Amino acid sequence: MINKIFFINPYPHYARGTNEATVYPPLGIAYLAGMLEKHGYECKIIDANILRMHNDDVLKIIEQEDPDVVCISINVSTAIAGNSLAREVKERFNKKVIMGGVQASSVTERTLKNSLADAVIIGESEQTILELVKNDCSPNGILGLAYLENDNVVYTGKRALIENLDELPWPAYHLLPQLKLYKCRARKFPVAPIFTTRGCPYQCIFCSSSSKKSVFGPRFRVRSPENVVAEIEYLAEEFGVKQVDILDDNFTLDMKRAEKICNILIERKNKVLINLQNGVRADRLTRELVFKLKKAGVFKAGIGIESGDQQILKIAKKALDLNQVRNAIKWFREAGIVVYGFFIFGLPGENEETMQRTIDFAIESNPHIANFNGCLPLPGTEMYDIVEKEGKFLNPIIDGVEVGYQAGTYLYQIGDVNPALINKYLKKAFREFYFRPSKIIEIAKISLSPGEIKWTFKAGYLIVKNLLAKKSENKGIFSKYFGALFKKTKVVA
């Protein structure tokens, strides 16, 4: 009989170019642990990523505490570590192993064969994990799973999406490491992330949320404003949270709902700062809504822009008018909200001219911060399929990668796009956007708290180290003056 379940977020110790300045708690497995705890199961979360625990350290805990089931969540960066950990758990302890997460849903068959797991959960997982545990981890008759039978992959059928998100228990925050260990641009500490919606109805070719194998699916579903505000108040009261980062793909898609959340927060004199971290769509904003967001406590917001070339946006299926972006940035600035613009280099159809247009648009529209990244064709996305059919991968991505968005290493080419071109324009973008006296002064002004100042220096240091500095310089001036500030230390659980 199953009683004790471990949930593990692996540590990709090998990864280069990941955003070490921003590391959030693994809300996915925290939701699953919350669901199982609600039904009487004993759960433990090991966030090996933030604790910097290698697989050997995790295996020692598994050996000592002897759980009945080990659940491992993987994404494209953690897949190599996660699959390796799963194999070791099976071979050394013969435990039941369940895999899940974005990567497992996207490349299910390879995950099963690479991990030797008993099953992979596909898509939204709360109901599936509960039924699976109740059934002693036998996948028979349970929708939303895949498993191996005589070396053949068996799919149990698609599970319907959860309709009433308010019925889900909140994430088991109490099982996570202390919130103060996690990192982001924080005006006040501690910070907690939340999801208030699920699903993305858009079809952007580069985004895992829009892929045919998206965990949350294509249909937009929401939590009620009352449920959202109640969680924010719970986090403030129980964990002393002073800032909430909303990680929704589409927080303002339903603008009336977003306005109602703001109204409740304003009525209750909310003192928790709010960061719309993942970005909102510029075409789902009004000036009135932006100013209401400010009154409700929003101090920072991002906008997904991707390209300054309208044709590239069309190819990428972004369905966005750049004039709407200009308006949104202007409104955020007028309201006194720090605004980020997210840009991608390396989409299909790109060349030197389109990439320069993106740089020019970033400078002209002038968000406070421009986040430039090269594209990583994630398995399961249309971008991945396009590269596979019309271009080529220089190194495999399907089983996970050892490099992140900020590594300066890109693993594909298509048309005029190749790693050298992407790197050239990433360096050019950072140089032209940031190395201006007016921008340097502005960034200094908006970094108001010690936490923000430290985050700004670390984020800048990592970008310069990975993209602008030569290898020989990495051990020179940047490391000399900034490296000691951000030296990696191991935290004991």
Image: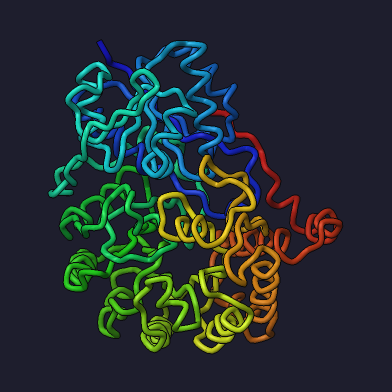
Coloring basis for residues: rainbow
Q: Position of residue 102 (x, y in %)?
A: 40, 44
Q: Position of residue 21 (x, y in %)?
A: 58, 54
Q: Is residue 68 left or right of residue 74?
A: left
Tell me if residue 181 comes above or below residue 7 in the rendering: below
Q: Position of residue 370 (x, y in %)?
A: 55, 74
* Residue at the (52%, 78%) spot, across then down: 368
* Residue at the (41%, 50%) spot, across then down: 380
The answer to whether any part of residue 372 appears in the image is: no
Asked where in the image residue 281 lies, by quadrant, the reply is: bottom left
Tell me if residue 387 comes above or below residue 71 in the rendering: below
- For the residue pair 368 and 117, the one nearer the viewer reads as 117
Q: Position of residue 466 (x, y in %)?
A: 70, 59
Tell me if residue 487 comes above or below residue 479 in the rendering: above
Question: Residue at the front extreme?
Answer: 389
The answer to whether any part of residue 232 appears in the image is: yes
Q: Is residue 308 left or right of residue 27?
A: right
* Residue at the (84%, 59%) spot, across then down: 473
* Residue at the (56%, 61%) spot, across then down: 391
- Number of marks present in the image shown: 0
Q: Is residue 134 left or right of residue 29?
A: left
Tell me if residue 441 comes above or below residue 64 in the rendering: below
Q: Is residue 225 left or right of residue 185?
A: left
